[in-house]
Image (spheres, helix red, strand yellow):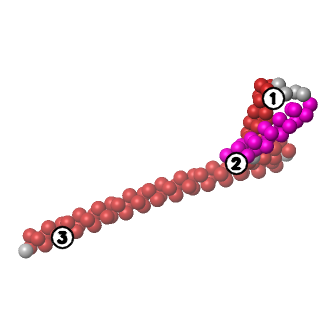
Amino acid sequence: MSFMLAVTDLAHATLVAVQEQERQREWERQRELWQVERERWERERERERIAIYARERVGGIGWLLHLLEQHKNLIINLISLYTFHKVVVRLVNCRSGYGEFFFSLLILGSLRFFLFRTG
């Protein structure tokens, strides 16, 4: 009977130790996540501080750089759209007045949906 109690106590102590280790691992993982989030937040603050400094120091150019940073996906999409339009116009060679105009509208209309939906 006392042997069974000793085995039960040992099993319980082992279970408690394993649960404590699991809690400790979870706590460490949570701490690492908080640290990563804090570092990301600090990097973002540093970028904002640099942008503010650039706007104050450089004036219009700093403001332009800040706008470019904020809207880089939109700018990339517009450049891609323009480049695609130029390539297709050269391939089809439809430089005859209204043909190019309507073809351009077709290209812009169809690609606008794709480019700006996929962002």
**Residue behind mark 3:** 9
Q: Amino acid at mark 1?
A: Val
**Residue behind mark 1:** 89
Q: Taking 38 as reference, is 78 left or right?
A: right
Magenta region, residue range:
97-119
For residue 19, what is the image quadrant? bottom left
Q: Amino acid at mark 3?
A: Asp
Q: Taking 9 as reference, is 104 left or right?
A: right
**Residue behind mark 2:** 117
Name the outermost residue toward the bottom. 1
Q: Position of residue 15 (x, y in %)?
A: 26, 65
- Up-down relation of residue 107 to residue 89 (above or below): below
Residue 107 colored in magenta in the image: yes
How many tags in the picture?
3
Q: Badge 3 local density, few (<14 within 10 Å), some, or many (20+)?
A: few
Mark 1 and mark 2: Cα distance apart in space:
23 Å
Instruction: Name which of mark 3 and mark 2 comes first in the sequence.
Output: 3
> Residue 115 or 2: which is nearer the viewer?
115
- Up-down relation of residue 29 to residue 102 (above or below): below
Q: Nearer the viewer, mark 3 or mark 2?
A: 2
Q: Could you tell me which residue is drawn at 67 percent across and 46 percent down?
A: 118
Task: Tell me whether circle 3 and circle 2 mark residues in contact (CB < 8 Å).
Answer: no
Q: Could you tell me which residue is drawn at 91 percent across and 34 percent down?
A: 98
Q: Taking 17 as reference, is 57 left or right?
A: right
Instruction: Name which of mark 1 and mark 2 comes first in the sequence.
Output: 1
Q: Amino acid at mark 2?
A: Arg
